[in-house]
Amino acid sequence: MAGGVVVANDDGPATDHGGRLTFSVIITCLVGASGGLIFGYDIGISGGVSTMEPFLKRFFPGVLKRMAEAKPGNEYCVYDSQALTAFTSSLYVAGLVASLVASRVTRAMGRQAVMVMGGALFFAGGAVTGAAVNIAMLIVGRMLLGFGVGFTNQAAPLFLAEMAPPRWRGSLTAGFQFFLAVGVVIATVTNYFASRVPWGWRLSLGLAGAPAFVIFLGALFLTDTPSSLVMRGHTGRARAALLRVRGPGADVEAELKGIVSSVEAARQGEDGAFRRMATRREYRPYLVFAVAMPMFFQLTGVIVISFFSPLVFRTIGFGSNAALMGNVILGAVNLVCLMLSTLVIDRYGRRVLFMVGGVIMIIAQVGVAWIMGAQVGKNGSAAMARPYAVAVVVFTCLHTAGFGCSWGPLGWVVPGEIFPVDIRSAGQAMNASIGLGLTFVQTQSFLAMLCRFRYATFAYYAAWVAVMTVFIAVFLPETKGVPLESMATVWARHWYWKRFAQDQGKGTET
């Protein structure tokens, strides 16, 4: 029996069917990409709230006690509290579970319905955390937020990749990370002003409902993707969706025929998508990247820097307000670099941006490690001079810039486009769940790492960025401009992965 992998013709370049950048596709993708707002808002809000003294006094008084007892300059371990990190990381346990569940829900109900559910769950979580009176209520609210993040992180990148014309897929799919960055900036600005009032932490946490309402309301007015509609037997609605988003000059029938062929081939596989990825050799490239992409995304170090940069800035001697303003600056740098990357992602391709961003991040992380090691010392007993503290902020901004033009957008773009249709939901679910699981591990362990490894924490992340940059250079084929239903061609031509593509061909001949 034939396998579910679609083997594209290797005789020539894939066709993009003439899809244009229509007003309809722009609006549709903007609304879909707004799902990144809720994840970005949470990333930006958590670290800032964790530095607000009224919040710490109510829920984590032990941290305030250590702050009062800490010697000047010896703040490496001040924030090392498992309860405090559980406030941040509990969301990602729930998100991990939700993203796996969302795979089945997405196949049964479609991408649009899952985004609606994600927005509703995140709204509920914001209401509970904003009204929290004890740690238990705080954690329950965080878990509701996690369910919302898990659903939207699984569905929104797929929605964007399937709706966007191949020629502009990179830029439009990067919109998810763009809105994520917008959410971070909104959250950090909110923290900066909310920190000035005793109840500001409630305002910061409760306003999570605002971006959730945006994605919930917007998703209600979206149509599902053509691929999802065909998979659920709605070919007529899929044709109507293509006509609306591709424009009058596009060869809609040819694109629909390709989608239908992909879905029919996918249905020939009787075993489950996760099982096929794990056990069948022809799916090996997809399994490798389903694991490698989220793992490397997390090991850039940008997630923990985004969460805990206010605490890092406090460690090197900045006051509370200055640390929060530093976080605002990081968010702005990330947003600007993401905007610039969307202009070139479909011109120069994915691999070039990965290489450039990797080199920038390595330089930045090594710079931070060197300055903190030389100025703060191994045990954190030395106070850092202000010029060196400013240099740490500059290097941290440089790292954020490198991430913003590479792994920031591409960490969502590449997983959204490389999987064949029969495992697309499962592949994205695996990508999202591994990412959220590793975010939990990192957010739960970063402050302990900073306490024990000190400045070497940043050298650790620099080493990982070097590894992932080499991996991308060697193993990732270029995917710019390739239609989703023809993506198998790039694997069939790759120097290493073509041996698995040959196995696909043998499988489909039987």
Image (cartoon, helix red, strand yellow):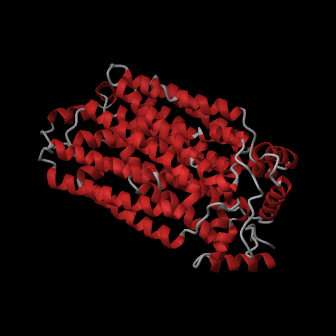
Closer to the camera in the image, 203 or 268: 203
Left or right of 15: which side holds 198? Answer: left
Closer to the camera in the image, 347 or 326: 347
Closer to the camera in the image, 44 or 15: 15
Location of residue 451 with respect to 484 vertically, above or below:
above
Left or right of 315: which side holds 248? Answer: right
| Outermost residue toward the right in this view | 236
Query: In the picture, residue 4 is in which quadrant?
Result: bottom right
Query: In the picture, residue 508 is in which quadrant?
Result: bottom right
Left or right of 254: which side holds 436? Answer: left
Query: Percent position (x, y) of residue 496?
Result: 57, 78
Q: Residue at x 20, y 53 (%)?
A: 371
Q: Residue at x 11, y 47 (%)?
A: 382
Location of residue 502 with respect to 382 vertically, above or below:
below
Query: Percent position (x, y) of residue 207?
Result: 49, 26
- Image quarter where the C terminus lies is bottom right
Question: Can residue 271 be seen?
Answer: yes
- Image quarter where the N terminus lies is bottom right
Query: Percent position (x, y) of residue 257?
Result: 84, 59
Tag count: 0
Query: Percent position (x, y) of residue 40?
Result: 49, 39
Question: Can residue 62 be seen?
Answer: no
Left or right of 502: which side holds 177? Answer: left
Q: Residue at x 32, y 48 (%)?
A: 396
Closer to the camera in the image, 213 or 273: 213
Q: Residue at x 81, y 51 (%)?
A: 230
